[in-house]
Image (cartoon, rainbow, N blue to C red):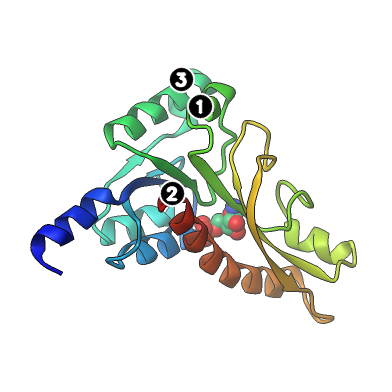
């Protein structure tokens, strides 16, 4: 490919901003996928709701811009969401990927970024919205568990489902062993879904 074609290719890539709050393993799976020259998206930045999130360091080590959007530094949630939008606009975000982002985004935000914001959740939604999904699946004697990528609306883990991966629950599983196997699938599913969305 000549240099013109390469720069054209980069130009056509969708700008993605990832929102995190913690360790950032799903964020890293997206960053790594986007490092491939044919991936249809590039990571324009990472925003964390927690200034101490481990994922921030990982993003910086990959040369990715970072910002903090910490709820307690704003008068209310709407102001925090508005500031988030300002940064997303400044970075020309076209797709927003929530990856362990521990804040429910308000109506104004989710309507403005409707069908442009996606999230990964560690359960086969609509089962087990919220936290402790692995233990809840084991306690319910489910045969399968898994992960879901869905569009984000202001109701927790309730937006339209895009794609899911099932994971078998083994007789010896505890929440930790199950979480580990689900996480492996999350890291495959999320970049796959992002690639499809960005290519549209
Ligand atoms: C993942 O299990 C994800 O599905 C959920 O929060 C966790 C974040 O983990 N939304 P990480 O920060 O991506 O490692």
* Disc 2/disc 3 C-alpha distance (Å): 32 Å
Asked which quadrant contains residue 148, the reply is: bottom right
- Whether residue 88 is visible, yes or no, is yes
- Mark 3 surroundings: few (<14), some (14-19) or many (≥20) residues within 10 A: few
> Vertically, is 69 above or below 30?
above
Between the residue at mark 1 and the residue at mark 3, the CA separation in whole angstroms equals: 11 Å
Identify the residue at image location x=42%, y=56%: 54
Mark 2 or mark 3, which is nearer to you?
2
What x and y, as percent, mark residue 13? 30, 51
Crowding near pointer 1: few (<14 within 10 Å), some, many (20+)? some
Q: Quadrant of the N terminus?
A: bottom left
Q: Which mark is residue 109?
A: 1
**Element type at marker 1?**
helix
Marks 1 and 3, the one that precedes in the sequence: 3
The label number, if any, that marks residue 200 in the structure image: 2
Foreground residue among 129 and 95? 95
- Report x, y in % for residue 24: 46, 58
Residue at point 48% right, 31% down?
A: 113
Residue for badge 3:
79
At x 64% / y 74%, what residue is drawn? Answer: 181
- Estimate the x, y position of residue 73 in percent, counting from the top left: 43, 26
Looking at the image, residue 174 lies above or below residue 84: below
Instruction: Please say if 126 is above or below 164.
Output: above
């Amino acid at each position: 490919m000549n240099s013109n074609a390469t720069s054209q290719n980069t130009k056509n890539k969708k700008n993605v901003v990832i929102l995190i709050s913690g360790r950032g393993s799903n964020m890293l799976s997206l960053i790594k996928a986007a490092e491939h020259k044919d991936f249809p998206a590039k990571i324009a930045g990472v925003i964390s709701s927690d200034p101490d999130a481990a994922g921030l360091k990982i993003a910086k080590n990959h040369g990715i811009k970072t910002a903090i959007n910490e709820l307690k530094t704003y008068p209310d949630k709407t102001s925090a969401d508005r500031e988030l939008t300002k940064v997303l606009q400044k970075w020309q975000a076209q797709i927003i990927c929530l990856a362990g982002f521990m804040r429910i985004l308000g109506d104004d935000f989710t309507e403005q970024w409707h069908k442009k914001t996606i999230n990964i959740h560690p359960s086969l939604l609509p089962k087990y919205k919220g936290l402790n999904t692995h233990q809840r699946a084991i306690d319910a004697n489910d045969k399968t568990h898994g992960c879901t990528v869905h569009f984000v609306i202001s109701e927790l883990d309730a937006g339209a489902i895009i794609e899911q991966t099932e994971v078998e629950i083994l007789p010896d599983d505890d929440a930790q062993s199950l979480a580990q196997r689900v996480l492996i699938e999350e890291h495959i599913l999320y970049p796959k879904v992002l690639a499809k969305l960005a290519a549209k």
